[in-house]
Amino acid sequence: MRLDALSYPFWSAEEVEAALRYALDQMERRRVLAYPTETVYGFGGAIDRESVAALIRLKRRPPGKPFLLLVDGSDTLARLDLHLPAYAANLAARHWPGPLTLVLPGGEGRVPPQLRGPEGGVAVRWTSHPALRRLIQAHGDAITSTSANRPGVPPAMTAGEILAQWPDAIARGDLRVLDGGRLAPSPPSTVVDCMGRHPRVIRPGAIPARVLRESVPTLIGDA
């Protein structure tokens, strides 16, 4: 089978709808999808233990380094039973959907331990990518996300880069690729830890700390 036979156009509304059945089938099989986001191409899938284990194997992720979750709105966040402290709610109201990742408490019994950071939080982003939001909506739950790249290689900005880097996984069907075209260069999402009394920037990114402080003056970190 040609590798491009497992790459599906994922740009126009019609292409997105046509690709959904293949994408949902891949997740039902507990396998990994590659997809475009508002920043870079990502790998991910369903949030059950088997699907997360498949993502760990593909990515060769070291133990203790969690993945983030992508959601399409507050309803999905509520289903995960994750909690927004008041300051996190202010940040979300201003910057979601968009390139802001919040590390949140909660989700006990709903989010597998492999998706938690060392202090027990779960990293979540409400994606602003319309096709990806449609996929999450059709799936009916959050999906995992990590950058689509091998160690030491920059995150993929095109589906072709993924096809070139992961031919064996694609040929086996362990990985299917949603082709959203070439993404524009952009910084990664800003990551804010919301597990303590005050929010703390743990990775600078697309939204500067000075902008976040307009909503939450007590923000710590990133000058």
Image (spheres, rainbow, N blue to C red):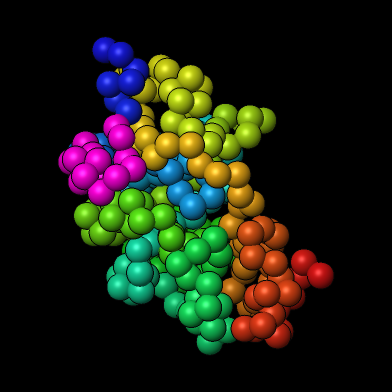
Quadrant of the frame with the N terminus: top left
Task: Give the residue at the far right of this rendering.
Answer: 223
Residue at the image position 42 percent from the left and 37 percent from the top: 181
Residue at the image position 45 percent from the left and 67 percent from the top: 97
Give the residues in magenta. Answer: 8-22
Q: In the image, is residue 181 part of the stretch drawn in magenta?
A: no
Of 10 and 52, the residue lying toward us = 10
Q: Could you tell me if residue 63 is visible in this image?
A: no
What type of secondary structure mainly makes up the magenta span? helix
Residue at the image position 56 percent from the left and 64 percent from the top: 100
Q: Could you tell me if residue 223 is visible in this image?
A: yes
Residue 170 vs 27, above or below: the answer is: above
| 114 displayed left or right of 27 | right
Of 179 and 155, the residue lying toward us = 179
Residue at the image position 71 percent from the left and 84 percent from the top: 218
Residue 169 vs 106, above or below: the answer is: above
Q: Give the percent coordinates (x, y) of residue 209.
A: 71, 71
| 204 displayed left or right of 166 | right
Q: Give the percent coordinates (x, y) of residue 13.
A: 25, 49
Q: Give the percent coordinates (x, y) of residue 143.
A: 36, 52
Q: In the image, is residue 20 part of the stretch drawn in magenta?
A: yes
Q: Give the percent coordinates (x, y) of residue 185.
A: 60, 44
Q: Quadrant of residue 109?
A: bottom left
Quadrant of the frame with the C terminus: bottom right
| 137 displayed left or right of 100 | left
Of 54 and 102, the residue lying toward us = 102
